[in-house]
Amino acid sequence: MSEVPEPAAALLKALHYAADLHKDGRRKGKAGEPYVNHVIEVAELLARVGDVHDVAILQAAVLHDVVEDTEASFEDVERAFGPEVRRIVEEVSDDKTLPREERKRLQVEKAPALSAAAKMVKIADKISNVCALMHSPPSEWTDERRLEYLVWSARVVDGCRGCNPRLESYYDKALAQCRTLLDGTP
Ligand code: ZN
């Protein structure tokens, strides 16, 4: 029996940790997917599309919403996964004490100053969200609200450009597809 390589074990630890914390979380879309599907998708996009193999970045991708959306703290993340993973998670987490519009404004404002690792996680996160908006939009969201989300996410991604051309063009394709779907024009 071959031994599980250390990076795989490290990534599995993050997956287990995130799955546990997000166990009651569901995505907002009408399909109501388990929330953990989203963070797995973000990490998978980074590895497959972005060709990212740095374990700390992939772990941070898996953990990117645990502080924002569960009771975990940045200290908890650091204790379990070290300072590098914590730093990336911290960079991509919104301050939930702020109103939604302010959080959205700050994401646009802060994007250009993020580390390359955090920028890549952000872009993969936006790809996952744009795809979800296409395939399983929240039922109460109007087309206008969906369009607003797309415009905003594009502004965040614009601030992250220059770190990973493959992820960036994948985002552009997802955005164009989603816009076409909303416009109803081919
Ligand atoms: Zn996310």
Image (tube, grey):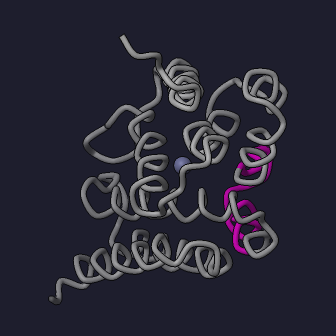
Residue found at x 37% / y 31%:
34
Q: Is residue 49 left or right of residue 183?
A: right
Please check the rendered image and state whether residue 11 is part of the magenta-colored stretch, yes or no.
no
Q: For residue 83, which quarter of the picture?
A: top right
Percent x, y of residue 108: 70, 73
Q: Is residue 115 left or right of residue 159?
A: right
Residue stretch in magenta: 93-108
Please check the rendered image and state whether residue 106 is part of the magenta-colored stretch, yes or no.
yes
Q: How many marks?
A: 0
* Front position in the image: 46 or 141: 46
Percent x, y of residue 95: 78, 48
Residue found at x 50% / y 80%:
151
Looking at this view, name the residue that lies furthest to the front: 1
Residue found at x 15% / y 88%:
186
Percent x, y of residue 36: 44, 33
Percent x, y of residue 54: 61, 48
* Front position in the image: 2 or 56: 2
45 relative to 67, above or below: below
State which quarter of the image contains the N terminus: top left
Residue found at x 64% / y 80%:
162
16 relative to 74, above or below: above
Looking at this view, name the residue that lies furthest to the bottom: 185
